[in-house]
Image (spheres, helix red, strand yellow):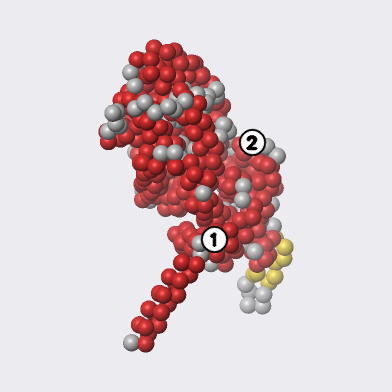
Amino acid sequence: MKKLSKSDIFWTFVRSNFAQGSWNMERMQALGFCFGVIPIIKKLYEGDERKQALKRHLEFYNTQPFVTAPIIGVVAALEEQKANGKEIADGVINGIKVGMMGPLAGVGDPIFWGTLRPITASLGASFAMGGSIFGPILFFVLFNLVRLFVRWYGIKYGYTKGTDVVSDVAGNTLQKITEGASILGLFVMGALVNKWTSVNVPLVVSTIHKQDGTVAVTTVQTILNQLMPGLIPLLLTFMCIKLMKNKVNPIWIIFGLFAVGILGYWTGILGM
Amino acid sequence: MEISSVQLIAIFIVSAIAGMGSVLDEFQTHRPLIACTLVGAILGDMTTGIIIGGTLEMIALGWMNIGAAMAPDAALASTISTILVIAGHQSIGAGIAIAMPLAAAGQVLTILCRTITVFFQHKADGFAEEGNLRGIDICHLGALGIQALRVAVPTLLVAMYVGTGAVQSMLDAIPPVITGGLQVAGGFIVVVGYAMVINMMQAGYLMPFFFLGFVIAAFTNFNLVAFGVIGLVLAILYIQLNPKYQKVAAAPAAAVAASDDDLDDDLDD
């Protein structure tokens, strides 16, 4: 009876932190996945069986890198059963990998890239822009704590539950988490569009000399701010979304906005 | 500013770590908050590094690799722009502006490296035929090494030549209308990142929460922590009240009723 030890699982966990190291245009994370499960293959197989196992895990694979953890766990459980003589075809293990990677990426992308990182990063940046070292540390610690937690318990969970995980992926819980994270992410994005942007249109609309000698200058920006502060950044955001939907590379949009900034500053329409 | 050889070695190591971070996307060492801070610390002006990092981080907020699509590269943009600001005596605004073409260049370089890595993938197939575990490890880590060099080598070159007269006069030749305009653009360039995040979520039906966040921010002085808590509460309420998830709602409802009774009892006392 071959059994994976705690240290095999631990080393798989350590290696899985390097899952994307050999990301390539042909098979994406295939080599990275194989690199991750090598402690498992080493323990369970020898000779020809080992070669078969290595080849099996060099097939095309790609998902959000943190949610790969439960998949690694399930694969560990399946490989353990297979090594102990249970009839599991190579295609089944790959089928489960490929079947889980799509739905899990759909969950992982909005949670980690859409919510966790923007929120921890903007929180860190809000301290960092004042020059405080607390900002970078806060971002680094918060993000990595969550990430390592998800990696470690993801692998454990997948390993203990085995193929039952597949039905969990299809269930309600993940959908709830994804939807909740999207709400939180979009809410904070709304706040950021308003607060962490600055546009000033200093064009003077009217200059009134009051009787007490003070001068009240009304610029376009004063009027816009009375209407709704942050209106221009909001419109710009939607313009960007529209352009991205039409497959315009974001870096070109950035250059375009730089050009707008230079032109606006030169003509005096935009100010600091 | 002359950069000593010890500093050059340290910059090489830090930018190699940033390069690895950019492909791994795990420890986030490629993010401006981390990379700029570290480079700033090496050059003896960590505070400036942190400020550049924070400013650049907001711009790069939505730069993420989704599926097979590569984002602009934060690693190269962070390391080189920090060197140009601190050792090249540029304003932070100018540094941010220079960072953008660097991010585009980094993006092209990483796609190139990820294409070269196909060779390592095929090499690994060969090692699998032989059952050679060590060989597969070397292929994987070798590819990671290429990504490290992708950032470390260009950064080192910039660090070596930033002190020379030619680079200095080139940087100083940028007219003030450009630097001023770039600074103005810096105020709203961040919306590209926000738009990338919103676009990725692909949840148009949840956009009311975006507008709510926008309006609350417009008329209050709440900080980000407050927004995080409100957003979390809204998310939980939405999930709890959504009819879509209400199949087994009877039991929790009973529990709430019970706790209400307890509260009533307490109030009676």
Quadrant (top left/top right/bottom left/bottom right) for the N terminus of chain B: top left
Q: Quadrant of residue A84?
A: top left
Q: Quadrant of residue A15?
A: top left
Q: In front here: A245 or B80?
A: A245
Is the residue B76 above or below the residue A197 in the image?
above
Is the residue B85 above or below the residue B111 in the image?
below
Badge 1 amino acid: Lys
Q: Name the subunit of mark 1.
A: B
- Tell me where residue B69 appears, x and y as whole percent: 58, 33
Is the residue B8 above or below the residue A112 in the image?
above
- Gap in Å between the C-alphas at discs 2 and 1? 43 Å
Q: In front here: A190 or A206?
A: A190
- Tell me where residue A147 appears, x and y as whole percent: 40, 43
- Tell me where residue B255 appears, x and y as whole percent: 43, 70
Do pointers 2 and 1 mark residues of a single chain?
A: no
Q: Which residue is mark 2?
A: A249
- Identified at 28% across, 28% down, the residue is A1
In the rendered structure, the answer to whether residue A207 lies left or right of residue A23 reads: right
Q: Which label number is shown at residue B29?
A: none
Quadrant (top left/top right/bottom left/bottom right) for the C terminus of chain B: bottom left
